[in-house]
Amino acid sequence: MEGKLGPEGLESLLTDLLIEMGLQRADSVLPGLALSLSEGWALVELNRVGTVHQQHIAARLQLEKSSASRLLAGLERQGWLTRERDPANRRYYRLALTAEGRAVADHIEEHLHERHARILARLDDSERTALAVGISALARAMRETTAHAGTATTSHHRGQERSASTRPA
């Protein structure tokens, strides 16, 4: 394991993990449900937080507004959620799970809990402890990198606009 702790080894491990996660098909993660992983995560998030604006789901799942809108419209057609205009701000939709949507989300969460328990049962106590520390650190680093990339992109675009506006016509 010593060689795996260098940057190349850690990158290789991270790549292996991401490939394994990417190879998880919706039907194996959510058996018996004809929905995508994004749809499943949207239902789970709504089940956990309750009524929210559509922008919350887009941000949480890191989807563009149009992608989130299509995804949520599909869940609405299934009868799993309601989308209503926010009376306080008609530009926004408020989302809420229907009773059927809550039942589907509960089923997903139960299945994921059982699946994760089977995976984690294969680890000993020291591995679970190390995993908790590692996942927390990795998630923090990913959030920081994403936030930094957004700031850099915004600054880069502002610089381009400034350069374009100062150029002679």
Image (cartoon, helix red, strand yellow):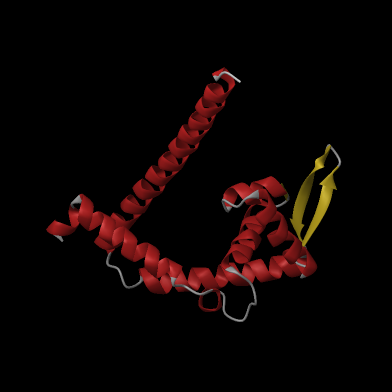
**x%, y% of residue 134?**
32, 52
In the image shown, does 110 or 169 lie closer to the viewer?
A: 169
Determine the image quadrant of residue 18.
bottom left
Does 6 sit above or below residue 25? above
Q: Looking at the image, which residue is at 83% across and 51% down?
A: 84
Determine the image quadrant of residue 102.
bottom right
Left of 49 or right of it: where is 73?
Answer: right
Total numbered circles: 0
Q: Residue furthest front?
A: 169
**x%, y% of residue 143?**
44, 43
Q: Pick the quarter of the image with the C terminus.
A: top right
- Asked if residue 27 shows in the view, the reply is yes
Q: Looking at the image, which residue is at 68% across and 46% down?
A: 55
In the image shown, does 41 or 153 lie closer to the viewer?
A: 153
In the image shown, does 166 or 158 lie closer to the viewer?
A: 166
- Asked if residue 53 shows in the view, the reply is no
Left of 154 or right of it: where is 133?
Answer: left
Q: Looking at the image, which residue is at 75% across and 53% down?
A: 95
**x%, y% of residue 133?**
32, 50
Does 88 sit above or below residue 79? above
Q: Residue furthest left?
A: 2
Q: Looking at the image, which residue is at 44% across and 67% down?
A: 22
**x%, y% of residue 158?**
54, 27
Q: Pick the quarter of the image with the N terminus.
A: bottom left
Left of 71 or right of it: where is 130?
Answer: left
Does 40 sit above or below residue 93? below
